[in-house]
Amino acid sequence: MRKALWIPACLLLFFIGDRLGGLILSKITAKSQFRYARLYEGQAKADILLLGNSRGLIFYQPHIEAITQKSTLNLSYNSMPIDLGRVVVTDYLEKYEAPELLVIDVTMCDRHNPQLIAGFSTFSQYSDNLNTLIKEKDEKSWYAGKLSNLYRYNSEVFQRTLYYLGKSDEDWLNDRVISPTMEANIINETAVDLTIDDYLLTQLDELIKIAEQKGVRVELVVNPYYPAYIQKMTTFYDFIGKIEGKTNKKVKDYSIALTATNGFADYQHLNKEGSKRYMDLLLRDGILSK
C-alpha cells in the first residue's frame, strides 16, 4: 500500500514544485530590463521600433535617441527569423500606441530558426501570437512547456532575462575593432549567401502590412557589411530583388556605406563608432527623423 502511494505522492510533489518554481521565475522575468520582458510587462513604449537579427543590434539606441530626441525599442535578437520578428512587433502594436517608425534590417529574412522560437517559451504566457508560433514550429517543445512551467525557462533567452535584472539592455555593441588577422583572412573567407523562400517573404510582407495599417512608417534597410565581405555575397542583389518584388517597397541598401576599418567589429557587425556614423547617415537620408 505504501509503495502504491509513493508514485502519486512524488508526482504531486513534482507538480507543486514545478508550478511554484515557474511562478518564482515568472516574477523574476517581470522585473528584468530585458527588452522582451519590458515589452510584455507594458514598459516598452517607444517612438521608434528597430528589428533584425544580430545585425539589427547595431542600431545603436543611445545615439539614435541623442540625435532624434525620440525613444527607441530594439526588438532584434541574435539569429532572429522574420516570423518571430513579426510576432514580437505584432504584440507590440496590439499592446501600445503605434510608434512613428519601424526600421527593419531585411537580412534577418535569410533563415528559419525553430530552435530560437522555442527558446522564447519564457514569454509564451504573455502572448497568444507567440504561443501559436511556438506550437507551429516546435510542437514537442510546446507540449513540454504545457507539462512543465519550469521547462519554459530552460533557454538562453531566459539567461539573458536574468543578465538584465537591474540594468539596461540598450547597449549590446562593443568597442572592439576588426583585427588585422581577420582583415587578412578575408581573402580565404567563404561568405554565406543570403537565401529567402516564399514563407519568409510572406512573413515580411504581412509584418509590413500590419504595421502600415496602424499608421507606422516602415523602412527596409540593409545594414553595413565589411566591404570585402559583401563582395563575396553573390546572391545579395537577387535577395534584395525578391524582397522588393514581394513587398513593393524599396530596400535602402547601406551594405557598402561604410568603408573605414575602425567602424567594424567583424565582417557582419559594426562596433559603436561605426554604428554612430551609420545612424548619422540614416538621419541624413530621412530614415530617422527629429
Image (tube, grey):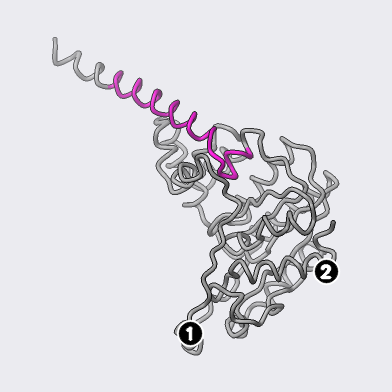
Q: Residue at x 81, y 68 (%)?
A: 250
Number of other residues with Cα within 10 Å of mark 2, as a class: few under 14, some 14 to 19, many 20 or more: few
Q: Which stretch did the figure color magenta?
A: 11-39
Q: Position of residue 202 (x, y in %)?
A: 70, 56
In the picture, measured across the screen, residue 269 lies left or right of residue 105, that is left
Q: Residue at x 49, y 43 (%)?
A: 161
Q: Where is residue 247 in the image (x, y as percent from the top left)?
A: 78, 61
Residue under numbered circle 1? 180
Q: Where is residue 138 in the image (x, y as percent from the top left)?
A: 48, 46
The disc labelled 1 sits on which kind of residue? Pro
Does 211 lie within the magenta span? no
Q: Earlier in the sequence, mark 2 or mark 1?
A: 1
Between 287 and 113, which is closer to the camera in this rendering?
A: 287
Q: Position of residue 223 (x, y in %)?
A: 67, 69
Q: Which residue is drawn at 57% across and 46% down?
A: 168
Q: In which quarter of the image is the N terminus?
A: top left
Q: Which residue is drawn at 78% across and 48% down?
A: 211
With respect to residue 6, does 148 lie above or below?
below
Of all residues, the one furthest to the top in this rendering is 1
Asked which quadrant contains residue 217, the reply is bottom right
Report helix, strand or loop for mark 2: helix
The disc labelled 2 sits on which kind of residue? Arg
In the picture, measured across the screen, residue 85 lies left or right of residue 3, that is right
Residue under numbered circle 2? 284
